[in-house]
Amino acid sequence: MPPHHNPSLIGTVQDVNGASVRIELLPETITGLTFVNGQPYRVGQVGSFVRIPLGFVNLYGIVSQVGAGAAPTPAATEQEKSYGNRWLLVQLVGEGRQGGRFERGLSQHPTIDDPVHIVTEEDLLSIYGSGVTDDHVTVGRLASAESIPAFVDINKLLTRHSAVLGTTGAGKSTTIAGLLTALSDPVHYPSARIVIFDIHGEYSRALKDRCIVYRAGSSSTLKDYERPLYVPYWALTSRELINLAFGAMDSSKEASLSEFITESKRDALKMYPKDGVTVDTATADSPIPFSIHKLWFELHKREFMTVIPKPGGTPDERIPAYVLGEEGQPRELGDAMGVKPPLYRTVKMTGPATERVQHGNEGLNIRQQVNTLASKLRDPRFSFLFNPGKWLPDLNGKTESDIASLLENWIGEFQPITILDLSGIPSNILTDLIGALIRILYDAVFWARNLPEGGRERPLLLVLEEAHAYLNSGNSNFASDVVKRIAKEGRKYGVGLMVVSQRPSEIDTTILSQCGTLFAMRLANDTDRNHVTGSASDNLKGLFDMLPVLRTGEAVIVGEAVSLPIRTLINVPPNDRRPDSTDPRVVARKVPDFGGYGYDTPGGWNQRRDKPQDYPAVARQWRQQTSRYEHSPAMANRTVVPTKTIKKKEQ
């Protein structure tokens, strides 16, 4: 056994099994805290690093187990047992040559009695580099050496996809805010392009100085960085549109509706030609404006029209049986844009032939679906889709703005981050709408991949918040299908995913396994933890066993964007830049005023109130279906009782 001259030397290699190495600590090695060149280091900590020098090469590994369980397989009998509990199980992850960069993977393995050293700050700097290049971005500090920043490779973070996983309250939203703040730095990344699918409306406060927020169902009191969200229905594929507008139906009826949509788009294209497509090449999926109000009107007539024989005509000639008013004129012909159907006379099969009223028999037997579309066209909650502002076509298909301006708004603005606030979207269409939005963005940058605004020239990062809600394992939907496609092939076309979830076990394994970098935060559930462990590319089970005890805002980062798997304290944004996801306080904090009195902050169970005064405002917000509000007179007049006064009354 070599003499213990170097203070960083802690043990020797005694067992090698692939990438797993078992290390016996030297008798003079003290576990706990040791000092090298005046700097403190912890020995025997799960997640810490070790270095094994082999000539001009240093092998690096991570401690995954400590103690007797890390020793080689014990002998059969107590008399034959010679192993104690001073053992480390290490997973080798990479190597570095003197004066060269650290590289993942191994070109050689250690042998018996090779010395093992703790990794010093100097070693860590050689592994992680200085981080001064634009290729790397700082996301926090190493938990084992807080003076050293933790860097991630921005190229691999975007193109190889990533996932931020942790239980509720682990600090996911704050971590995302910190990551996106770093990735959208206007000095280093002035042309960054990030889209956040925010289904709870959490991120506008944290990123307001560098984002544009598009809100569905937004009120008139928009802030300067907010705009209403419009999703033109005609930009959807026929399947997406049929599912959102009409609801589920069998394949034969869906195919017939697709034909009607195709004809509607071609008719509009004849009057208002579009660059890049002709009447002959247009399909049901082409993003061509057409009037869905006109389509509904024509479908309603086919389904509900009744007819009477034409006077003096042949038996096959018929005329619409409108309800007649004064002087025999039709009383209500209907209004397509107003979603008012025509009025028809009821069926009458008796009397003279010219007075009989029959069904038109030209429909597809989709009366219920046609009525569903009419209901959605009238519903103000769906106005973002069927009444999309400047992108609403008239009956002939003419619009004020085309799809180019929509894409420019979403991913071409001067701000690097676009937040699609979907908190106001009806829950029954949320999953399908998210799938349609992702597909629109992906198709745009995919087909334009070789243009300056395409994915290869200017990559696009899609941040999918609460991903388990719409990327369920075993549940095929539009969102899951398009995200699987991006996970498999988006790397080649400059479209990256950042999947965020508190229930990784509910996310489709195809998607999670394609995430090259994992930010694993606190996960107490065994099922979720095993799901993350199985998705990681590194054999670091011992490292993932730490997930239940990670601190809030702490993450284990593994994968392609980091040189070594690292336990990191994520940079915490200041209070005014944190997402709107903090827990409410059951017991309110006391804030002293200038007079020396202690006042409770508004809310909390420990605050005395005269009487409830805010329920009219509660009812108003419920009716408005929005959490955005201005303070009502009742709230402005709410009484907050000084703490000293409370104490005097109690005395």
Image (cartoon, rainbow, N blue to C red):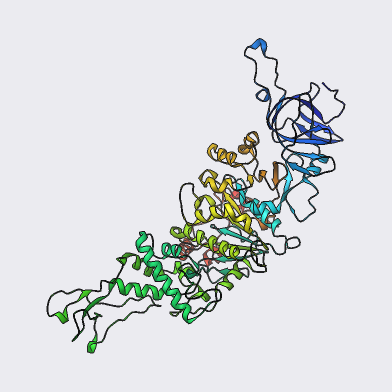
Can you say whether 367 is above or below 91 in the image? below
Residue lying farthest to the front in this orientation:
280
Would you say residue 651 is visible in this rendering?
Answer: no
The quarter of the image holding the N terminus is: top right
**Residue 323 position within the rendered picture, expressed as x and y whole percent measured from the top left:** 24, 80
Q: Nearer the viewer, residue 418 or 242?
A: 242
Q: Residue furthest bottom?
A: 327
Q: Is residue 230 placed above or below 127 in the rendered structure? A: below
Q: Residue furthest left?
A: 351
Q: Position of residue 142 (x, y in %)?
A: 74, 43
- x, y percent for residue 546: 64, 36
Side of 195 relative to 99 (left or right): left
Q: Left or right? Give the position of 358 relative to 415.
A: left
Task: Answer left or right for 200 relative to 373.
Answer: right
Please tell me which residue is depicted at 35% across the width and 65% down the height of the picture.
369
In this figure, what is the number of numbered marks?
0
Please identify the quarter of the rendering in which residue 354 is found.
Answer: bottom left
Where is residue 578? Give x, y as percent.
65, 55
Q: Nearer the viewer, residue 293 or 32?
A: 293
Where residue 107 sits, quadrant-wise, is top right
Question: Going by the picture, which residue comes out furthest to the top?
Answer: 79
31 and 497: which one is in front? 497
From this viewpoint, is residue 140 visible? Answer: yes
Near-viewer residue (583 or 103): 103
Picture layout, residue 328 above or below residue 447:
below
